[in-house]
Image (cartoon, grey):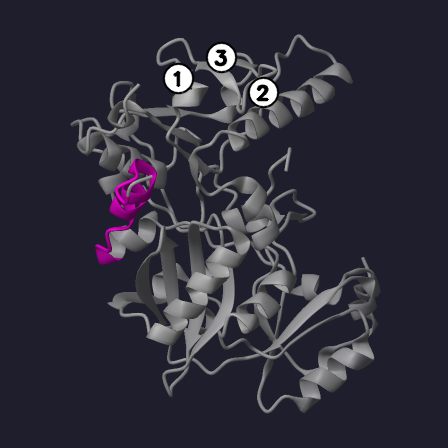
Amino acid sequence: MNGAARPVLVVSEQVDAATDMVVDELNMRDIPVIRLDAERFPQHLTLAAEHGADSTGWRGTLDDGRRPVRLEDVRAVYYRRPGRSHIADSVEEPYRLWARDQADAAFLNILSALPARWMNNPHADRYAAHKPIQVPTAARCGLSVPRSLITNDPLVARDFVRRLPGPAICKPVLSGRLPGMDGRRRMVPTHRVEAGDLDESVRLTAHYFQEEIEKDHEVRLTVVGGQMFGCVIRGTSDAARTDWRTDYEGLEYATTAVPAEVAAGVTSFMAGFGLVYGAFDFAVTPSGEWVFFECNPTGTWAWVENRTGLPIAAAHADHLGGRHGG
Amino acid sequence: MSATTVPFAARAATLPAVMPSSLLGVTWDTGRQINVNADGTPWYTSDLAASTTDTNLDGKSDETADPYYAPAS
């Protein structure tokens, strides 16, 4: 199969606007696309991968009954939050759970072993997503970071907060489920804390404290295959200024250029984690300094393109299609 | 539930803001492999398509789950 005919494999949920944008861009470029969701495996997707004694890679097919793809032909994989494998209801526990683990492991890792370009390999995402790893990495890459503390000691926490020149904030170490008594899921937003608030309940688990950065505005910097798209986010309410995720009605958007030193740091950060895609959150201080908050390796971006016109889907297609020769 | 059984940070827990999104009138275009509106235009061009918080439109918000969970990773 010649290079032009090798397909891009898109693994994503069916209802996902960002994936639609990428697939449509690839369609417009006449780059073959096979889109499927991992949750259809094994009931509606058939995988057959064989590795010979003298081979250097898996060969075989992934077939949804409509568009079979030869594994060895895949030029790139766009992997974006697919569902989990779904085992037939007729399979009873404990075999059902066991079967799902087997299916998940085979599907993801056969694809991971293909000699294709990725965006992003979830193995890289998983490691890169952790804030305690991100902060020192960002600093080593030359990016400014807030003073930070992770502790379960309330005395240490109070001392840290008192030593700061300004306010302190608390944020979760990890996004995760926190169901309320009513069963509805809660989130823990970034919120301001005072030293006197910090009591023995800090001992109950790890807590993440940071200095609050005085912001002129925030930037969602979307990085795709080396291309960078800066989106200014200005909060027009107190809630939006502290954590823009908590008040979407209180936000204004614009575009911005990326300072060279920030671009260099971000490039180094991405390379260090093996990421091709990343959604970075920065605060920009009144003096113009960009301060790194975090990188979301699977962060949402369709809303950025819709609000700003930044050509993020096109950048995905550039990378997945191998415009630069891959 | 007494305060000493609730980790400090979790006291700030709140229901997440969820940007509204809608699949009203949207169908799957098998040939193009994208979601389309009733008039054939791509769904992603709709104001109510690209949520900042609700990637799979399950109404639970991305902030209440670990989006990096890969079961075999």
Subunit ID for the residue under disc 2: A
Circle 1: residue type: Val
Q: Looking at the rendering, which quadrant does residue A149 occupy?
A: bottom right
**Residue for point 43% across, 21% down:** A72
Q: Which residues are magenta?
A: A308-324
Quarter of the picture holding the C terminus of chain A: top left
- Residue A86, numbered circle: 2
Given residues B30 and A280, the one toward you in this image is A280
Given residues A213 and A316, the one toward you in this image is A316
Kindly report the distance in space between the C-alpha atoms of the residues bearing marks 3 and 2: 9 Å
Prevalent SS, magenta region: helix
The residue under label 3 is: A44
A227 with respect to B38 (left or right): right
Task: Residue at the far left: name it.
Answer: B39
Tell me, yes or no, whether dots 3 and 1 are on the same chain: yes
Subunit ID for the residue under disc 3: A
The residue under label 1 is: A69
Q: Is residue A313 magenta?
A: yes
Q: Is residue A242 visible?
A: no
Q: Is residue A122 magenta?
A: no
